[in-house]
Amino acid sequence: WSLGCVLYELCTLRHPFEGSNLKQLVLRICRGRYSPVSQRYSSELHLLLHLLFKVSPRDRPSANSLLKRPLLQQKISKHLDTQLLEEEFSHTVLHRHTPAAPKATNNTGVYVCVCVCV
């Protein structure tokens, strides 16, 4: 849900759920009603927002399934070299141990971590 909110705000520069009072805001959130993003964005992005804003948490995509979506795979592959990409995606996203220090940087010298570690 939070990822949907951040993505929506990046695309629109507005909050996805707004109301003139707290009750109206809560009702809009609970119903999952939001104004669509501009049609200039891809149908894949529209679908991604639709999936992220599913009211029931069990109906929303997992982190693993999100990372396997073609749109995200394409964007991620632009920032990770092939070896690091294979290493990061050769296992599940959730770990039960503390991650090791980052092994590589992207071209800008910024450390890239695709995993969510708990």
Image (spheres, grey):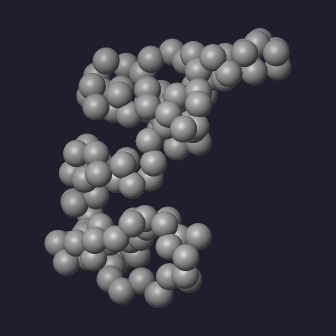
Give me the residue at 28% from left, 31% from top.
44
Quadrant where the N terminus sits is top right
Residue 10 percent across, percent down from the top left: 47, 37
Q: Residue 9 at x, y = what percent?
A: 52, 34
The answer to which quarter of the image holds residue 108 is bottom left
Total of numbered circles in the picture?
0
- Whether residue 4 is visible to the viewer of this picture, yes or no, is no
| Residue drawn at point x = 36 percent, y = 49 percent | 65
Above-or-below relation of 46 to 113:
above
Res 51 → quadrant: top left
From this viewpoint, is residue 91 visible?
A: yes
In this picture, residue 4 sits left or right of residue 42: right
Residue lying furthest right in this view? 22
Looking at the image, which residue sits at the far left?
82
Residue farthest along the front direction in this orientation: 58
20 and 62: which is toward the camera: 62
- Residue at (52%, 28%) from the top-left corner? 54
Percent across and percent down for residue 82 are 17, 72
- The residue nearer to you, when weighing 40 against 99, is 99
- Left or right, 12 with respect to 88, comes to right
Quadrant (top left, top right, bottom left, bottom right) of the C terminus: bottom right
Q: Is residue 100 left or right of residue 31?
A: left
Instruction: Tell me: 39 left or right of 7.
Output: left
* Residue at point 55%, 76% (across, down): 96
Q: Position of residue 55 (x, y in %)?
A: 59, 27
Q: Is residue 19 above or below residue 105?
A: above
